[in-house]
Amino acid sequence: MKTLICAILLTVAMPAAASGQQIQTVAGNGSRDQQAVIKILRDWLGALARNDLAAVERIIADDYVITAAEGVVLNKERDLAPLRSGDTKFDSASAEDVNVRVFGHTAIVTGIAAFSVRVRGKAFDLRERFTDVYVKRKGRWQPVSSHTTPLPPPPKMMTSGGN
């Protein structure tokens, strides 16, 4: 099960929700390239939230790789396998603290992503810090690499009236 959860974390590396997509950026409107990268991120996250495998496959580069905190490295084919098999279904996703830095034809995107997913019918809520690398090829921005680090759940609030 731990391997499957790791695969889910890899699959959901960055996404935000299709219904009510939320991407909260740390800077203002930014440059045209920054806005283009944010749009791709929204599209990617929306496609994941809709479980639209064909759209995800179009968005990410064929040479895409993702590395999880555990050191697991997956290529595009292996990363998308849980979606392709139907084992993983997204219910919602959001991203916050998103920062896009553009260096010519390369962009680095960092942020925090939160997801509600079902794996073989069992529900999970996941939060992770992510770093994505996008490259502009033939005028089109594409994610080529991701790295994720799972975050612990937020601390439970203490209820009043207790000790």
Image: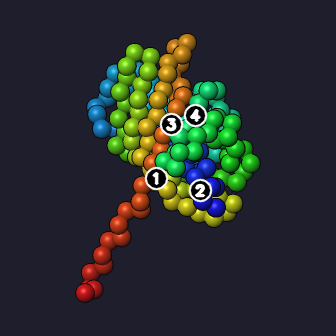
- Mark 3: give few (<14), some (14-19) or many (20+) Cα within 10 Å: many
- Mark 2: give few (<14), some (14-19) or many (20+) Cα within 10 Å: some
Identify the element where label 2 is drawn.
Answer: helix
Tell me: 116 left or right of 25. Answer: right
- Mark 4: give few (<14), some (14-19) or many (20+) Cα within 10 Å: many
Colour scheme of the rendered structure = rainbow
The structure residue drawn at horizontal position 69% and vertical position 60%, both measured from the top left corner, is 120
Q: Going from the N terminus, do you reach mark 1 or mark 2 first?
A: 2
Q: Position of residue 30 (x, y in %)?
A: 32, 26
Q: Going from the N terminus, do you reach mark 1 or mark 4 first?
A: 4
The structure residue drawn at horizontal position 50% and vertical position 18%, both measured from the top left corner, is 136
Placement of 23 over or under 8, stated as above or below: above
User: Which residue has dot 2 on it?
Assistant: 5
Identify the element where label 1 is drawn.
Answer: strand
User: Which residue has dot 4 on it?
Assistant: 65
Q: Going from the N terminus, do you reach mark 4 or mark 2 first?
A: 2
- The type of residue carrying mark 4 is Val
The structure residue drawn at horizontal position 67% and vertical position 40%, both measured from the top left corner, is 78
Q: Going from the N terminus, do you reach mark 2 or mark 3 first?
A: 2
Q: Going from the N terminus, do you reach mark 3 or mark 4 first?
A: 4
- The type of residue carrying mark 1 is Pro
Residue 98 appears in view: yes
- The type of residue carrying mark 3 is Ser
In this orientation, which residue lies closer to the viewer: 85 or 28? 85
